[in-house]
Image: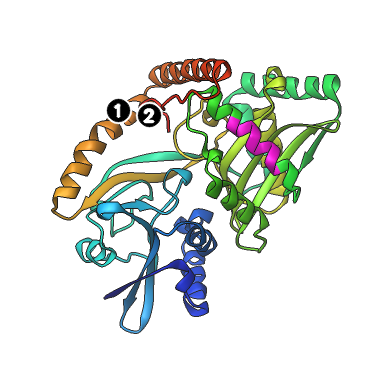
Amino acid sequence: MNISIVRPGDLGETEISRWRDLQGADASLDNPFLSVEFALAMGRLRDYVRVAVVEDGDKIVGFFPYERHNFGIGKPLGGFLTTCHGLISVPDLKVDLRALLRACKLSVFDFDHMVAGQPTFEAHQTDVRPAPIMDLSVGFDAYIEQVRANSPKNYKTVRYKERKLGREQGELRFEWDSADGGALRQLMQWKSDQYRRTGRVDRFAQPWIVQLLDEMHAERSSTFSGVLTMVYAGDTPVAGHFGLRTADTLVGWFPAYDTEFARYSPGIVHHLLMAEHAANAGLRQVDMGKGGREYKGWLKTGDLFVAEGRVSRPSPTAAVHWMGRAPVNKARTIVTDRPELYRLADRVLKGFGRMRTSVQNQSPATVVKEPWGAG
């Protein structure tokens, strides 16, 4: 096999078409974060994005998008922003990992949302975790009946709050695939407020991430596009979400809501309405991503699986990187595996967020550093 390294923008129409064909032929690759459009956008915005093109003879058999940071540290494309990464290739392709790292000029490559079971990386998986999905393959009615059966009390409560929101705040209106740039800005503002309130890093403080969402919002094709959804009570926006879709899958990315309406659980109301409209739009599933909130447990009707692991070439950089990352990864796994610890960590971060907001309000010039794990 021959491995060549290019910037995404250097891919020609032949390579782009081949990428789409490979992705479309394998159901395990049905995720917009694996699409060539996402790689092209990241390549326009970030200098460290590269693609390894794997050829067998005169035929391209795989693409490996990645980020190359200082000292040969490799990260998945999009890093902390994405919920899926991997090798876009012919089925069952197994690439020599040492040769791949050497060609990519990487000392180490960490992954935590790898498509599980890819032969190239399978031997280096240290854990495989479920990513909950809303399975809409047999229609919304079948999906909602399963949700109702799985958690009748939660379902009844949310539907009651949905009716109450409509009565007290104005008739509910759901907008699917909105082209409104102002609504996208409103969603980002809600999300920034949530990040600060819960003690986490504000993604949208980085201009390139805002630009990425703008570019994704403008993408429109049958196999890849950004999807903005909003719930309104009367003329007032109360909750929304921005995600990416393929022909069959919508991936959860940035959900948020106006805290003024928190008593109505507008985020959950939005998710159920989004699932209904996604099914009507011909989508077969909504991927909610691994880990996180309890609501995913009762909204889900299936699971995909993603893997965590690490590959490296012997080097001082790889050794230092392992010493720095291993304890953090171990601690994160322990916390996310135990709901009581997750809730405790969440309360601690929210407390930090309140403290940080209070300090910043008193002294705008004050800079408060993020605590460990706030990202």
Badge 1 is on which residue?
331
Above or below, 146 against 319 in this view is above
Tell me whether the residue at label 2 lies in contact with that at label 1, contact meaning CB atoms closer than 8 angstroms: yes
Magenta stretch?
184-192
Q: Residue at x 50, y 19 (%)?
A: 356
Instruction: Give the residue pinned by disc 2.
Output: 373
The location of residue 196, given as percent across then percent down, is: 54, 26
Measuring from the top left, give residue 67's x and y in whole percent.
37, 56
The Cα atoms of the two marked residues, 2 and 1, are separated by 10 Å
Name the residue located 41 percent from the left edge and 27 percent from the top edge.
370
For the residue marked with disc 2, what is the amino acid?
Answer: Gly
**Which quarter of the figure is the C terminus placed in?**
top left
Residue 105 in picture, x, y percent from top left:
25, 62
- Label 1 is placed on what type of residue? Ala
Q: Nearer the viewer, residue 339 or 257?
A: 257
Colour mapping used in the image: rainbow
Left or right: where does residue 104 sit relative to residue 10? left
- Residue 4 figure quarter: bottom left
Can residue 31 be seen here? The reply is no
Left or right of 16 on screen, residue 221: right
Q: Position of residue 368 (x, y in %)?
A: 44, 24
Q: Is residue 87 magenta?
A: no
Q: Nearer the viewer, residue 280 or 253?
A: 253
SS at mark 2 in the image: loop
